[in-house]
Image (tube, rainbow, N blue to C red):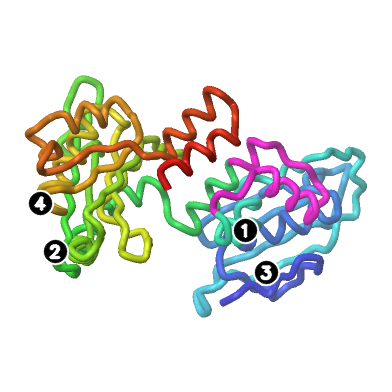
Amino acid sequence: MPSTFNVGQELYVGMEFDSKDAVKNAVKQYVMRVHQSFKVVESKWDKYVICCLNRNADCPCLFYMRAILSKKTDSWKVTQWGGPHTCLNMTMTQDHEKLDSNLIASCVVGMIREDPSIKISLIQERINSQFAYKVSYKKAWLAKQKAIAIEYGDWDESYAKLSSWLTHMQNHSPGSYFQILHDDFIVGNTISREHRQFHRVFWTFGQCKEAFKYCKPIIQVDGTHLYGKYRGTLLMATSQDGNGGVLPLAFAVVEGETLTAWSWFLAHLREHVTDKNGICLISDRHASIKSAVANEALGWQPPHGYHVYCVRHIASNFNRKFNNAKHKEMLKKLVE
């Protein structure tokens, strides 16, 4: 059931929450609003008890709360509430010890849902406006990672489920194909028999392969770095339909833009996407792509394929060297 707590209201006996984390977040928000804090007296799977941080024989502050997991409703309920703080907080700080990354993540998960690439500075601004406390860049960054995991799943779990996801795709999408390569997982000096380490993955959709038969005989390949918890490079192959629309053909996640990675990707492109001759293969001037295409065994040499360079990449390199945006646009117009 949803929580009955709203930011700004008092806690009371009978207040209900859908989880223990919801209880914790409510208490954190409560004490931050009044610039106080608390300490945990007892924390179990079915019980959560807190009191004032300063509570002792010299400071009999009334702030106290006990919440338990109700077996009847499967929800958490406040069963004891001593009341607001009766002590004075003599210290004020810009940050708050209870404003941790878990609480921040629960507050910004909606922002992550709207824009997973949101800047850390915007998260800091949101928390400052909501709680009147400033959080460090590191804490906001960590909260963003946790919010991404809440919304899209854990990084480790996602990689672990990759094989089952792609198998499901292949079983329910005729003509689709994938291949995952693993390395041995070494613990100490011993190869683990229970675990494997991800190396590469290639996949293509059957519908896209079928659509390519009716598109222009061109394929553009490119790579981009991945900046999540696990680094790597995403390789892509796309084409164009008669209206200039982009058609995705194949993808791969590899260790980097190396010769072996590009050779592996281009070989799969030939074997599992198209065997059509006379294809114009467009790329940037990356040395690994040039070397892979030069390998006749991969099937991208004439008359099977004709390798050309992307004008936009050439223009960007031109501008990077000569720093002249006007000449860059003139260069692009030469081939339009």
Q: Secondary structure at mark 1?
A: helix
Residue at the location (24% across, 36% down)?
199
* Mark 3 or 4: the one toward you: 4
Vertical order, 4 against 301 (above or below) = below
Identify which amino acid the numbered label 1 is placed on: Met
The residues bearing labels 2 and 4 have C-alpha atoms spaced at a distance of: 14 Å
Identify which amino acid the numbered label 3 is placed on: Val
Residue at the location (64% across, 64% down)?
67
Point out the stretch of residues depicted in magenta.
116-141
Q: How many numbered marks appear?
A: 4
Pointers 3 and 4 in contact (CB under 8 A)? no
* Mark 3 or 1: the one toward you: 1
Task: Tell me, yes or no, whether the highlighted magenta stretch contains residue 208.
Answer: no
In the picture of the structure, the residue carrying the numbered disc 2 is 175
The disc placed on residue 111 is 1
In the picture of the structure, the residue carrying the numbered disc 3 is 78
Instruction: Give coordinates of residue 216: x percent, y percent.
Output: 25, 58
- Within 10 Å of disc 2 (Cα), the crowding (few <14, some 14-19, many 20+) is some
The disc placed on residue 275 is 4
Q: Earlier in the sequence, mark 3 or mark 4?
A: 3
**Residue 228 appears in the figure:** no
Identify which amino acid the numbered label 2 is placed on: Gly
